[in-house]
Image: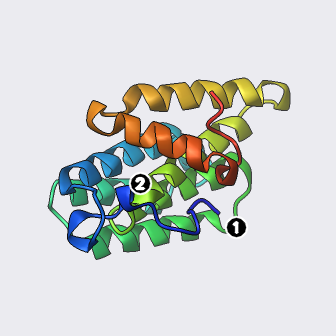
């Protein structure tokens, strides 16, 4: 589980009664796509002929540019998660990261899911004794990619949801 039981109004768009602007929603989608793409090779090395996770990342970015509707990005995200189902380890987590990135267009709070699954993928791709360090390195890389406009929002979200996101944001 990566979503809180009660929706944070900071991740609900203004037109739906929250405080999130469309431009910040788009930045969250782009950041989630970057997080997912950073570990995508872990999926593609296991399933080089399966385009679903890459397509979800592309659709997330296309949504942020206004080129596709939310439903298209969300559907692509669902297909990416389907690609993960029969896998284990790093490849599975990388596909889930892509799926979460595609879902940001629908629910902005999925941004943290993309990041958390990417960290889990980085951990799973390394020997057990190096997994924690790999996760911290991935977490720091992600934080370096955060757009300034949403940086504090995401860092606070990581603090608030760290426990339900497998405590991967302790970096």
Q: Residue at x 38, y 47 (%)?
A: 33
Can you give x and y, in whole percent of width and height, for residue 111 in the image?
Answer: 44, 52
Can you give x and y, in whole percent of width and height, for residue 77 in the image?
Answer: 44, 66
Density class for disc 2 (Cα within 10 Å; few <14, some 14-19, many ≥20) is many
**Is residue 140 at least partly visible in the picture?**
yes
Query: Does residue 39 appear to the left or right of 146 in the view shown?
Result: right
**Is residue 118 at least partly visible in the picture?**
no
Vertical relation: 79 (above or below) 87: below
Q: In which quarter of the image is residue 151?
A: top left
Q: Residue at x 62, y 27 (%)?
A: 171
Residue annotated with mark 2: 54
Q: Is mark 1 on a helix, strand or loop?
A: loop
Closest to the observer: 76 or 71?
71
The total number of labels drawn is: 2
Closest to the observer: 111 or 152?
152
Vertical relation: 117 (above or below) 15: above
| Measured Cα–Cα span from mark 1 to mark 2 | 17 Å
Can you give x and y, in whole percent of width and height, for residue 78 in the image?
Answer: 47, 71
Residue annotated with mark 1: 86
Closest to the observer: 16 or 102?
16
Query: Does residue 79 appear to the left or right of 3 in the view shown?
Result: left
């Amino acid at each position: 589980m990566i979503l809180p039981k009660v929706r944070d109004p900071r991740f609900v768009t203004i037109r739906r009664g929250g405080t999130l602007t469309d431009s910040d929603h788009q930045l969250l989608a782009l950041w989630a796509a970057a997080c997912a793409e950073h570990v995508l090779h872990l999926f593609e090395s296991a399933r080089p002929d399966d385009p679903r996770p890459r397509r979800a990342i592309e659709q997330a970015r296309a949504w942020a540019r206004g080129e596709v509707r939310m439903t298209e990005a969300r559907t692509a995200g669902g297909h990416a998660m389907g690609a993960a189902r029969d896998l284990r380890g790093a490849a599975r987590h990388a596909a889930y990261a892509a799926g979460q990135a595609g879902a940001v267009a629908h629910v902005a709070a999925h941004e943290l899911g993309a990041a958390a699954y990417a960290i889990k993928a980085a951990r799973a791709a390394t020997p057990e004794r190096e997994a924690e360090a790999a996760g911290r390195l991935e977490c720091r890389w992600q934080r370096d990619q955060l757009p300034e406009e949403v940086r504090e929002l995401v860092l606070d979200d990581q603090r608030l949801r760290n426990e339900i996101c497998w405590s991967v944001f302790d970096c």
